[in-house]
Image (spheres, coloured by chain):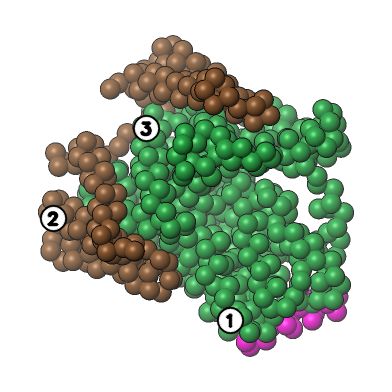
Chain colours: A green, B brown
C-alpha cells in the first residue's frame, strides 16, 4: 500500500505532470499521422530523455506512446486510414458512421472507449504487478499458439455478409504472411529474386493499401466523406453527437470491459498483443452482440470493441516489460531502451527496488489516456468537419499522407510501390465484398502461428495441445464457434423481422436507430 | 463486369496465385518440408476457399452477390474509375523522379486544376501538402524523406 501511495506521490510531482502535458500532444500527432505509430514515436523521442530524471523521462516516453492509438482512431474514423496498424479494425464501423454524417458520434465512442480501456489496462497493471510471475510464466509456446488460433477463429466472423469470403481473405493473409525469411530456419521463401521480398511483405504498406487507397479512390469521385442530407444540405456535427458517442461506450459497458480485459490479456503475452488485439476484440464483440449483422454497417459496438482494447493492451504489455524485462510488444523494446538510457534495468529486481516507480508509471498511463481523450473530445466537433470537405480537395492530401507515411517507416520506395499494389487488391476486395480486416488479421497471425507451432512441436511433442491452458483455450474456440452459429441463426430471423418493419415504415433500420438517437 | 463475373474472377485469381506459388515452391525452388509445411497448410486452405468461391459464384443468387459487394461512388465523366486509376498510377513515378515536395505538389496542382477547384482551395491544398511533407515530416519529425529530385540525390 505504501508503494502505491509513493507511486501516486511520484506521479503527482509538478515536473512529471508538466512532461505529461507536453508528451500527450506529441503522441497524438504521431497517432494521427498514418504510418508513424508508437514504434516511430518512441524511436524519435528516445534520445530526448537522455539526462532526465528516471521517472520524468519514462513518464515522457510512456505518455506519448500511450496516446498514439487514441490519435490514430481519429484518422481511422474520419478518413478511413489507419493512423497506426492497430487502428485498422476501428475503420470497419467507424468510417461507415462517418460516411453517414455521424463522425462525432463515432469519435465520441472511440475516444471514451480508448480512455476507459487505457484506465482498465492500468488498473490490471496495478493488480498484477505484485503477483505477475506465475501468470506470465504459465504461458509457453503451446499456449501462445492457441491464443493465435483463437484469433484465427474470428476470421470468418470478420467476413461481414459472407463467412467464406472472410475465410478466403484470412487464408490469403496467412499465405502472404509466409513470404520472406522463415523465423525458425532463416530460409527466405517466395522472394522471387526480389530483394524487397526477402523480409516479406510489410504491415504498414499492406494496411495503408488495403484500407486507405480504396477509400481515396472513392473520394476521387468528388463527394465529401460524410453523406449529405436528402435535401442536399451538409450534415451538422455537434458536441451533442460527440457526447452521445461517449455515453454509448458507457451504456455498452460490458462490450467495453470485455474488450479491455481481453486487450490486456493479449498485451500481456509477449509478441501477441499490439496488432492482433483490436481484431480479436472486434470479432469477440461481434460474437457476443445481439445484433451481429449490424457489424460492418456502422455498429457502434464495432467501434467500442477494438478501441477498448487498443489502449488497454499497453497496460498488459507493460507487465512483462517491467516484471521480467521481456518486452510485451515491439514498442516496449524501445521503452526498455529508455530504461537503460536512464540507468535502470527492468526485471524482477526492478520491481523489488522500484515498485513505487512501477506504480507511478501505471498512474502515468491513466493520466495520459484521460488527458489524450479529453483533448480530442473537446476538438472532436472541429476535427469531424474534415468529413465535410470536398473529396477532390481531400484526395491529394490523403495520398500525400499515405505516400509519406509508407516511405517514412523504412525509408524505402518499395513500401510506397507496394501500397499501390495492395491498394489495387484492396479495391477489388472492397468491390466484391471480401473482408480486408480478415486479410490483415491472417497476415499478422501467420508468423506467430508458424513459429509457436514449430517450437511447440519440437519442445513438447505432438501432444502439446493437451496442456491445461491449451485445453481451456481450445474450449473457448469451440464454444465461440458454436455460439456464433446459434447467434447467426437468430440474427437471420431478426433481419427478416426488421426488413418487414422497414417495408411497413419506410427507411433502413439504421435510419430508424439514428432517428431515436438524434 | 457483373458481380457474378467479378466473384468468379476473384476466385480464379486466388486459385491461380496460391497454386502457382506452391507448385513453384515444390518443383522450382525445391524448399524442404520443414520450410514448406506452413505455406502448404495456408495455401491449401486458400485453394479450397477459392474452389468453394468459384462454385458459389455460379450457385448464389444475383441479389446475394450484389448485397455483399460495395459500390464505389460515381462522379461526373472526369471521375470515371479508369481516370481515377490513371491519376493514382501517376503519383508513384512523380514522387520517385521529382522528389516528394515537387512531385506531390505538382500532382496536387494538376489534380485540383483538372477537377476545377477554386483557386484558393488549390493553393490551400498545396500549402497543406507542403506543410505535411516538408515542415511536418522532414523538418519537425526529422524523417529523412527524398525531398530532392532523383538526379540531385546522393
Mark yes or no: residue A398 visible.
no
Report the disc number at residue B87: none
Q: Is residue B118 above or below residue A153?
A: below
Residue A371 occupies which quadrant of the picture? Answer: bottom right
Q: Are marks 1 and 3 in contact (CB under 8 Å)?
A: no
Q: Are marks 1 and 2 in contact (CB under 8 Å)?
A: no
Q: Are marks 2 and 3 in contact (CB under 8 Å)?
A: no
Mark yes or no: residue B39 visible.
yes
Answer yes or no: are tags 2 and 3 on the same subunit. no
**Which residue in the structure is indicated by mark 3?**
A428
Instruction: Quote the CA–CA distance across marks 2 and 3.
Output: 28 Å
Residue A469: in magenta span: no
Task: Report helix, strand or loop for mark 1.
Answer: helix
Horizontally, residue A16 falls left or right of residue A472, namely left
Q: Residue at x 42, y 54 (%)?
A: A412
Work out whether residue A61 or residue B78 is closer to the camera in this orientation and state it: A61
Amino acid at each position: 500500500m505504501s508503494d502505491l501511495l509513493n507511486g501516486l506521490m511520484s506521479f503527482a510531482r509538478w515536473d512529471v505532470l508538466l512532461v505529461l502535458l507536453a508528451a500527450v500532444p506529441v503522441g497524438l500527432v504521431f497517432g494521427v499521422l498514418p504510418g508513424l505509430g508508437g514504434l516511430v514515436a518512441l524511436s524519435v523521442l528516445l534520445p530526448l530523455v537522455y539526462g532526465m530524471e528516471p521517472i520524468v523521462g519514462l513518464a515522457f516516453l510512456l505518455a506519448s506512446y500511450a496516446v498514439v492509438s487514441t490519435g490514430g482512431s481519429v484518422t481511422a474514423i474520419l478518413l478511413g486510414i489507419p493512423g497506426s496498424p492497430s487502428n485498422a479494425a476501428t475503420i470497419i464501423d467507424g468510417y461507415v458512421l462517418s460516411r453517414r454524417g455521424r463522425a462525432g458520434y463515432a469519435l465520441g465512442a472511440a475516444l471514451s472507449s480508448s480512455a476507459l480501456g487505457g484506465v482498465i489496462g492500468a488498473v490490471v497493471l496495478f493488480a498484477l504487478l505484485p503477483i505477475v510471475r506465475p501468470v506470465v510464466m504459465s504461458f509457453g509456446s503451446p499456449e501462445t499458439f492457441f491464443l493465435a488460433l483463437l484469433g484465427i477463429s474470428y476470421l470468418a466472423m470478420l467476413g461481414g455478409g459472407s463467412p467464406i469470403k472472410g475465410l478466403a481473405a484470412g487464408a490469403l493473409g496467412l499465405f502472404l504472411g509466409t513470404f520472406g525469411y522463415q523465423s525458425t530456419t532463416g530460409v527466405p521463401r517466395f522472394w522471387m529474386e526480389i530483394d524487397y521480398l526477402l523480409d516479406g511483405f510489410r504491415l504498414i504498406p499492406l494496411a495503408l493499401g488495403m484500407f486507405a487507397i480504396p477509400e481515396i479512390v472513392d473520394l476521387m469521385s468528388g463527394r465529401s466523406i460524410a453523406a449529405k442530407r436528402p435535401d442536399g444540405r451538409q450534415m451538422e456535427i455537434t458536441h451533442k453527437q460527440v457526447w452521445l458517442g461517449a455515453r454509448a461506450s458507457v451504456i455498452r459497458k460490458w462490450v467495453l470491459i470485455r474488450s479491455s480485459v481481453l486487450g490486456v490479456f493479449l498485451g500481456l503475452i509477449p509478441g501477441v498483443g499490439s496488432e492482433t488485439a483490436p481484431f480479436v476484440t472486434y470479432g469477440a464483440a461481434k460474437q457476443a452482440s445481439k445484433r451481429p449483422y449490424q457489424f460492418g454497417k456502422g455498429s457502434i459496438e464495432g467501434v467500442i470493441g477494438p478501441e477498448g482494447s487498443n489502449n488497454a493492451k499497453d497496460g498488459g504489455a507493460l507487465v512483462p516489460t517491467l516484471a521480467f524485462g521481456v518486452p510485451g510488444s515491439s514498442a516496449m523494446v524501445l521503452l526498455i531502451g529508455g530504461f537503460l538510457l536512464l540507468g535502470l534495468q527492468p526485471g524482477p529486481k526492478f520491481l523489488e527496488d522500484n515498485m513505487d516507480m512501477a506504480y507511478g508509471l501505471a498512474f502515468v498511463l491513466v493520466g495520459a489516456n484521460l488527458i489524450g481523450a479529453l483533448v480530442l473530445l473537446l476538438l472532436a466537433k472541429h476535427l469531424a468537419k474534415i468529413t465535410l470537405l470536398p473529396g477532390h480537395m481531400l484526395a491529394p492530401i490523403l495520398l500525400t499522407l499515405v505516400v509519406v507515411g509508407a516511405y517514412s517507416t523504412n525509408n524505402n520506395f518499395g513500401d510506397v510501390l507496394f501500397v499501390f499494389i495492395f491498394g489495387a487488391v484492396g479495391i477489388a476486395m472492397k468491390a466484391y465484398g471480401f473482408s480486408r480486416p480478415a486479410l490483415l488479421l491472417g497476415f499478422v497471425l501467420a508468423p506467430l502461428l508458424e513459429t509457436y507451432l514449430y517450437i511447440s512441436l519440437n519442445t513438447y511433442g505432438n501432444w502439446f495441445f493437451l496442456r491445461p491452458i491449451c485445453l481451456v483455450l481450445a474450449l473457448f474456440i469451440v464454444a465461440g464457434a458454436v455460439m456464433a452459429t446459434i447467434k447467426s441463426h437468430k440474427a437471420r430471423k431478426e433481419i427478416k423481422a426488421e426488413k418487414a418493419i422497414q417495408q411497413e415504415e419506410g427507411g433502413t433500420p439504421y435510419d430508424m436507430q439514428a432517428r431515436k438517437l438524434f | 463486369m457483373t458481380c457474378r463475373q467479378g466473384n468468379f474472377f476473384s476466385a480464379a485469381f486466388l486459385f491461380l496465385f496460391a497454386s502457382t506459388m506452391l507448385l513453384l515452391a515444390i518443383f522450382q525452388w525445391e524448399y524442404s518440408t520443414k520450410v514448406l509445411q506452413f505455406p502448404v497448410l495456408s495455401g491449401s486452405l486458400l485453394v479450397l476457399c477459392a474452389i468453394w468461391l468459384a462454385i458459389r459464384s455460379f450457385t448464389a443468387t444475383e441479389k446475394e452477390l450484389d448485397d455483399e459487394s460495395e459500390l464505389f461512388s460515381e462522379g461526373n465523366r472526369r471521375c470515371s474509375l479508369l481516370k481515377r486509376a490513371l491519376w493514382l498510377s501517376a503519383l508513384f513515378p512523380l514522387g520517385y523522379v521529382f522528389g516528394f515536395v515537387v512531385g506531390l505538389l505538382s500532382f496536387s496542382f494538376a489534380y485540383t486544376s483538372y477537377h476545377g477547384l477554386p483557386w484558393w482551395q488549390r493553393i490551400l491544398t498545396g500549402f497543406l501538402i507542403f506543410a505535411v511533407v516538408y515542415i511536418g515530416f522532414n523538418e519537425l519529425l526529422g524523417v529523412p524523406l527524398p525531398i530532392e529530385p532523383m538526379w540531385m540525390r546522393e
